[in-house]
Image (tube, rainbow, N blue to C red):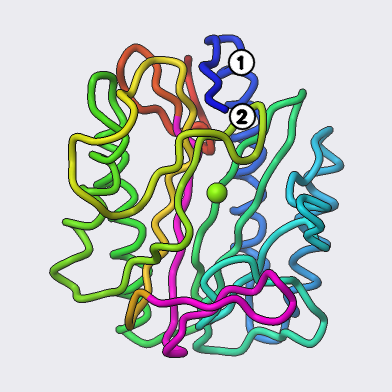
Amino acid sequence: MLYIKTLDTIRTMAEGGKLLYNTLELLKSEIRPGISTKELNKIAHRYIISNGASPTFLGYGGFPASICTSKNEVVIHGIPSYSCILQEGDIISVDVGVSYKGFHTDGARTFAVGRISSEAEQLIKVCTDSFFAGMKYASAGNRISDIGHAVEEYVKPYGYGIVREFTGHGVGNQLHESPSIPNYGKPGHGLRICDGMTLAIEPMINMGGDAVRIQKDGWTTVTADGKPAAHYENTVAVVSGQPVILTAPDVSL
Ligand code: MG
């Protein structure tokens, strides 16, 4: 289902988005060698609840935690655990969903644990920059596939894999709405972008090949070749024809 939002709704989503941004910043400050991903989950859960919102992912489709924590070769949907303890040199992707006043926002980052290799640093940077390369095309009159095409063109020179089985998506009334937003493809296809769309744009970039597989728990999605992966996501609204990041500290609308 596609939902076009009013400016009032987008403003409400921006309030939730600010909380989501602050949650990611809090997690960033807590990430260090020796902390478990379960502890990160608790920190995020408490922070979201104490700010009058709720963690969207908890119970979504049966997901057993408030955030996703995906270490090294885990691309997305890692389940927080006391036995998953971060070590110097790891990279950790955290994905957070916030439900606030009835509307959802979605955002993710990949963080370094202590000092990491220059290869891992570059992977995180290219993934982040590919989001911004794609987001620029989320303006009125363009088509949805223009976003993914720009992501793919940005990533291509680095030879990284782009995850194909999972995509960005509309977000707001529900966590996952239409349209789906692949991070690859030809330009000029799909829905025409218009004011009131709210889109979770989220490149998932692998140091090795494209292929991923889902582990027996039904969630944890890892690279097939075991190489590390990065994830970067924001919720973006189209307002006055232009993309505006809602999962951000200060949104003026
Ligand atoms: Mg998402």
Callout 1: CB less than 8 Å from ligand 1? no
Q: Quadrant of the N terminus?
A: top right
- Front residue (pair 132, 171): 171
Is residue 160 placed above or below 135 in the rendered structure? below
Is residue 64 placed above or below 245 in the rendered structure? below
Is 235 inside the magenta-drawn segment?
yes
Is residue 248 placed above or below 208 in the rendered structure? above
Dot 2 alpha-carbon crowd within 10 angstroms: few under 14, some 14 to 19, many 20 or more: many
Quadrant location of residue 190? top left
Question: Can residue 121 be seen in this snapshot?
Answer: yes
Q: Which residue is mark 1?
A: 9
- Disc ID at residue 172: 2
Is residue 97 placed above or below 177 in the rendered structure? below
State the image coordinates of residue 164 (x, y, percent, origin top left).
Answer: 39, 63
Return the residue found at the far left. 157
Q: Secondary structure at mark 2?
A: loop
Magenta stretch?
A: 211-236
Q: Secondary structure at mark 1?
A: helix
Which amino acid type is marked by label 2?
Answer: Gly
| Circles 1 and 2 in contact, beta carbons < 8 Å | yes
Is 131 inside the magenta-drawn segment?
no
